[in-house]
Image: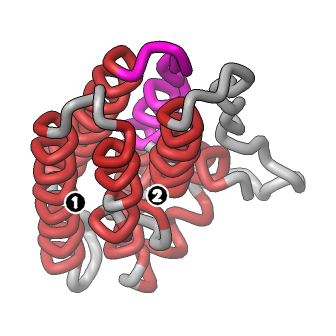
Amino acid sequence: MKPRLAGAAIFAFAAVALTAGCGSDDAAPPVLPAPGATSAQAPPADLDDPVVAWAERVCGVVEQGGRSLARFPAVDPNDPAKTKRAMVDYLKAISAELGKLGEGISSAGAPPVDGGDAAVEAALQRIATLRASLADAQEKLSAVPATDPAAFQAALADLGPKLEGLHSAEGPTADLKANPELKEAFSSAPTCRRVEGA
């Protein structure tokens, strides 16, 4: 999953849902950008390099998650209950994709670099923290009656600080790229370049 795509999706969806809660009938789901194509011709990647191959496997999971999250749920401005269900379901979907990313990182094994184990541990910890925030937001949003527009809007506005890690950071891959060797591998692997829009 492109982490920034997930964050943008949540906040765009929240904005649309807030508009729906206010009773506007001209709100429409925003169109989310697809993961960017490469803007320049990259040098050929050495996929025989075990570090680059490791990054390529991880970015394959990231890319698949980004595709899933780009399927934006429909919002009906005249049906607050449907909007609420769609928002809760989308939070669940983001959490599920983060779970798949964690599984993908774990199944790739420790990257063959110095400090690779620590980088993976940090990334998995970030995923766990983000999923806990998503679960909390989902629980609170589920408890708010959709028939109470003020409470519903307040709950949606409260999502921002709780999901800061998705919105303003690169997400779990930032912890992996904090390792210089992994950062270089991420910049070389074709799928990573495609996901990052590089």
Query: Which of the 4 image quadrants contains residue 174?
Result: bottom left
Which is more N-terminal, label 1 or label 2?
2
- The amino acid beneath tag 2 is Val
193 lies above or below 98:
below
In the image: residue 81, left or right of residue 12: left
The residue drawn where x is 65% and y is 28% is 24
Residue that carries the numbered disc 2 in the rendered image:
52
Circle 2: is it few (<14), some (14-19), or many (20+) Cα within 10 Å?
many
Secondary structure at badge 1 equals: helix
Secondary structure at badge 2 equals: helix
The residue drawn where x is 39% and y is 22% is 80
Residue 178: where, in percent of width, then height? 39, 83
Q: Please give the range of residues in magenta.
A: 60-80
For the residues carrying marks 2 and 1, which lies nearer the camera in this image? Answer: 1
Residue that carries the numbered disc 1 in the rendered image:
130
The residue drawn where x is 50% and y is 48% is 2
Q: Are marks 2 and 1 in contact (CB under 8 Å)?
A: no
- The amino acid beneath tag 1 is Leu
Q: Is residue 188 magenta?
A: no
